[in-house]
Structure formats: structure tokens, C-alpha cells
Amino acid sequence: MTLTERDLKVIWHPYTQMQTAAPPVGIVRGEGAVLYGEDGREYIDAVSSWWVNIHGHAHQYIAKKVAEQLQKLEHVIFAGFTHEPAVELAERLLELLPQNQQKVFYSDNGSTAVEVAIKMCLQYWHNKGEQRTKIMAFKNAYHGDTFGAMAVSGRSAFTNAFEKLLFDVEFIDLPTADNIENIKYQVSSIKTELACFIFEPLVQGSAGMLMYEAEYLNELVAHCKAEDVFTIDDEVFTGFGRTGKAFACEHITEQPDIMCFSKGLTGGTMALGITTCTQHIYDAFLSADRLKTLFHGHSFTANPVACAAALASMDLFVAPETKENIARIESSHASFSNEVKHHPKVRTIRQTGTIVALEWETGNNTSYFSSLRDTLYQHFLQQGIILRPLGNVLYILPPYCITNEQLNYIYSAIKQALDTI
Ligand SMILES: *Cc1c(COP(=O)(O)O)cnc(C)c1O
């Protein structure tokens, strides 16, 4: 039996309609930007395996560091104990972040990093004896799939079944020159109830790579600060170079109160989440009163092996070569955008850093729209490229080690598809 056949008997896949989905592709190994199928085929991973991979697959340096850590200490309870990888990772990450970020809280993934951020804010106000339970977020936001993270995400077909159980959130539009004053007014009018504002900086990934301007985000964050509303910068997707800078918040001058990380944190090697916060927030949990403790933790909090992977990934991330690769991808995406932007099938094309997203023109043809995503996905898979369109939005966000040759192969396949599909 093939992997695929064995899989279909026992496995339920994420975000997959198991009745109609094509059988999963068995992957046996990876190297650089390429994944190798059990059928002997090669696939260029143009979406970094759901946006997590930054240095390429099965990176030998990360593998070596992980193997060394596994032989030293695989795990230890993180309440009452600590270890070198967790301490070193916290020290080194904080050095890269805005200087107001002072404390690191570990968890398991992006959703849990968001849960922790929300709980920090809600309990901050609780500990201060203030009734502030409302959270503000952007329409179409995506912050994860656990209940709290789902609640602060935009309401959609994905959340329908759980709608009644999701707590109330104040959803606002993405800020623009036209609406920023209105949004600020909206914040001020509910500020006494608002615990925090959570946002995806510059790019709303799951919403279809929607992009907005740093200038108005900066103005909004500044306004929240002035009104005493905490800001949570969810860098789970945008962190570690995706937007061209190490973190998307470097595109603005205001510093968020809390930041969330996962995905690229371990280079896409292992699951790990981090929530960082200011000293001010941390201090609100210090007390002789045990009830002021942040009661949150996971069995695998600060897993040493995952921390070792993150440290190895960070070594690679700060190397000059990575910066050069990011700049190289940025400029080749820009040339590609210029080449195709006037194509009749291109409604719009937008780019932030290493992310380029092309909105496919579907006219008024709704049946074309509904089949387009699957058609494109299968088409590119046949060409040996993994691209997973979000509706009619086709995007590329590759591992930074992708070669120019591989990038050009992807661009040509898209140009050809624009002419033929
Ligand atoms: C992916 C994502 C999450 C959730 O991370 P998981 O590790 O998948 O739980 C949260 N926020 C943003 C912005 C994301 O893109």
C-alpha cells in the first residue's frame, strides 16, 4: 500500500472536506525549497508549508542542533524548572524585538500564543479591579483556531458552527486615510470597556493576503496607547522576515504592548509559540495574592528541543545571507508583479516583502469563481508547484533559500496559467 492509501484509512486532515478532497500527496523527504513525493515527483514548496518554513526543508544545521539537544534533555516541566535553550532563546529574541518587550511566555503554537496574549490583557484589568472585557480586532482577521483565537478572528463560514459560543468582539475596518479618524473615535467611545486591540500587522494572511498601510496602523496603535488600550501585535505569520523586515512592527514607530510568534520561529521545524509583553503588564501579575497569577500553561511549555530548533533557526536568520535572500525575493516578486499587472486575468497584484498575492479576475462568473481555487491548486500541483489559493487569490511566499531558477519556474507557470485557465 502507498502512504496515500494507508492515510485514507486512518487520517482526518485539517481544513479538508474528506469526501471530495483529492487524496493527499505522500511526501518522503525535503531539501531546500523542494519536497519529494513517494511517487518520485518533486514539488517546489511555494507556500512554505503553510507559511512556516523560512530556511528550507530538512535543514542540516537545524537538524544537527535538534539532535544534540535531544541527547541532552528532551523535556522538563517548565513550572519550577528552567533550562538553557529556553533562557537563551528568550534573551536572544528580546534583543531583536522593540525595547519595550521584556518578558517571554512560552506555549505551543500560534493559536496558543494568541490565547496567552488575550488572557494577559483580560487578567491585567481583572487584577487591577477594572471591568474591561471587550476586545477589538479587524474585520476578516485570523488569529487561530482555538476558541479564544477564533473569537477574535473575523466571522466567516469557518466559524459559523461556533458563532453563539464566541465572545463579543468589536470589529473595525482596516485603517485608511479616509476612515482613520472615525476608527479613532470608535476606540475612544468604548475605551473604558476595551481590554485590548489585536491585529495582524500590514498583512492579513488568511483573509487573502489583504495588505494595508503602515502609516495608519501606526496612528491607530498610537491612539490606543493614548487611550490606555493594550495593543497585541500578532506576528505569527509576519515575524522572521516575511514582510522584508525581521518583524512587521519595524515598519511602524509605535511599539505594541504584546507580541505573538510561531510559524517561522523554529524555521518551520517544530511547533512552538511565544508571547512577549512589557514589564508593565508583567508587573500587574506580581502579588502576594496567588489569585493574581497568570493561570496558563501547557504540558510542553518551552520544550527544549523546540527551543533548540528556534535558536538554530535564529542563527541562520541573523546571517547576512538570509537578509540578501529576502531582498532578492522582494525584488524578483516586484519584477514579476510589473510583468503581469496589466494582464486581463489579473484584477490586482500586491506585495509586502517576500509575499506576493495575485487576485484572479473572475468577472461575474460565479461558477468559475467557485471552481477556480481547486482548478488552480490541482493545475500547479501537476506542474510540481505547491500553491494554495485562498479563493481567487493566488500567492507565493517561499522559503528564503528558494533559488532564482525555482522562482522563475513558478512565475512562468503562473504566466502560462493566466493565459490558459
Ligand atoms: C497561522 C496564524 C495563527 C495561528 O497559528 P497556529 O500555529 O496555526 O495555531 C495566528 N495568527 C496568525 C496571524 C496566523 O497567520
Image (cartoon, rainbow, N blue to C red):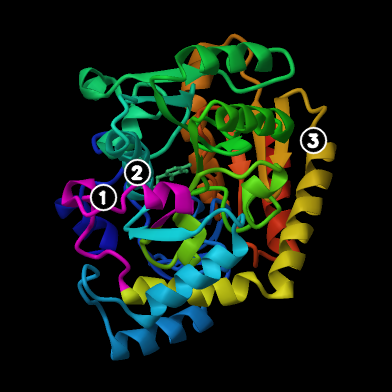
The quadrant of the picture occupied by the N terminus is bottom left
- Ligand 1 image position (quadrant): top left
Q: Residues within 10 Å of mark 1 (few under 14, many from 20)?
A: some
Confirm whether the magenta stretch covers residue 285.
yes
C-beta proximity under 8 Å, tags 1 and 2:
yes
Confirm whether the magenta stretch covers residue 48.
no
Residue with the mark numbered 2: 120
**Tag 1: amino acid:** Leu
Q: Position of residue 86 (x, y in %)?
A: 39, 73
Which comes sooner in the sequence, label 3 or label 1?
1
Q: Position of residue 85 (x, y in %)?
A: 40, 78
Does the rendering let one see residue 300? yes
Mark 3: secondary structure: helix
From the Cβ of disc 1, is ligand 1 less than 8 Å away?
no
Mark 1: secondary structure: loop
Does the rendering let one see residue 308? no
Residue with the mark numbered 1: 294
Mark 2: secondary structure: helix
Q: Which mark is residue 340?
A: 3
